[in-house]
Image (cartoon, grey):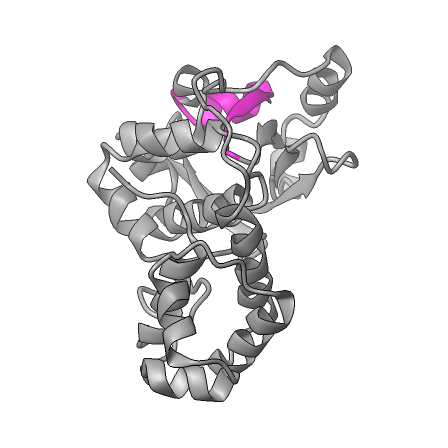
Amino acid sequence: MVTSPAFGSYLQHLRRATVAPGFTPGVEGPPRQRISRDQLANNAGISVSYLSKLEQGYPIHPTREVVDQLADALAVNDLVREHLHDLVDYTYAKPVPIETAPLSPSVITAEQRQHVEWLCPNLAGWVTEAWWVLYGNREYCRIYRHLEEVRNILIWFFAVPESRKIMVEWDVEARLTVAWLRSHMVRRAEDHAFVRLLDELSKFPEFVRMWEQQQILMGRHSPYMRIRDLDNSEEMTLLANVYRHPDPTSGIQLYVGARPPRRQADVVR
């Protein structure tokens, strides 16, 4: 069983980390030295006992100023700094019963369905921030075999064996999606579908390993995604991106994987 993100555990993770935080396509990021609790407290201008209580998860709500001082002392980038602020809000949010939280979200509109269908032969689909697939066009469903059945991209990565053949860089893409989930989750404290999804994913050892690395990301590390069409064994590189819905409260995103232009010889043929 994996645990939900928490400010204290992530702060301790950053202090003890021997590689730079965030996300890197390689197995490990650039090396860095661990920071002792005494050193971090001194550099951040807080007491050691206060830092210790923060790391242990005591119900202490640090101010934005204190979080920024800690981020400065840890020398983290802007993404990690923002994640620390998000974690404070998430960790100390008022708990809400999760029994009624849906495991997957509601349907989308007919116009949104038509939108992605008209993007064929490019791959396109509406997905939530918890990676539930609301609707994918014909080419999206054809290439990503069985995704229409399991309905969640992360479950597909770890439960469907074909995903390892389709995603040429499976490990990188899986870690990227896990890191993105962690970043999204702390911005949706009120959405307990994330907690239920974590419970579902915790049965996959590889997901647990990636989740415990505590990598974070908001957006793709690269605009390119390498996939394999299992119908003809063709490998291709898509120009891939995820676009947020204009309504920030919707939690919906549009995935588009644009195919490369057809060669002139293929067009003539």
Which of these two is toward me, 211 or 30?
211
Along the horizontal axis of the image, is 230 left or right of 223?
left
Q: Quadrant of residue 103?
A: top left
For the N terminus, the image quarter is top left
Q: Residue at x 40, y 23 (%)?
A: 145
Name above or below for residue 181 compared with residue 115: below
Residue 141 magenta? yes
Q: Where residue 61 sits: x, y (%)?
A: 53, 58
The answer to whether residue 7 is seen in the rendering is yes
Name above or below for residue 212 compared with residue 262: below
The answer to whether residue 232 is seen in the rendering is no
For the C terminus, the image quarter is top right
Which of these two is toward me, 32 or 70?
70
Along the horizontal axis of the image, is 148 left or right of 121?
left
Q: Which residues are magenta?
A: 130-146
Q: Where residue 193 sits: x, y (%)?
A: 48, 27
Name above or below for residue 266 compared with residue 26: above
Residue 28 magenta? no
Q: Where residue 238 sits: x, y (%)?
A: 55, 45
Q: Residue at x 56, y 69 (%)?
A: 67
Q: Where residue 182 sits: x, y (%)?
A: 46, 47
Q: Quadrant of residue 21?
A: bottom left
Q: Residue at x 69, y 17 (%)?
A: 113
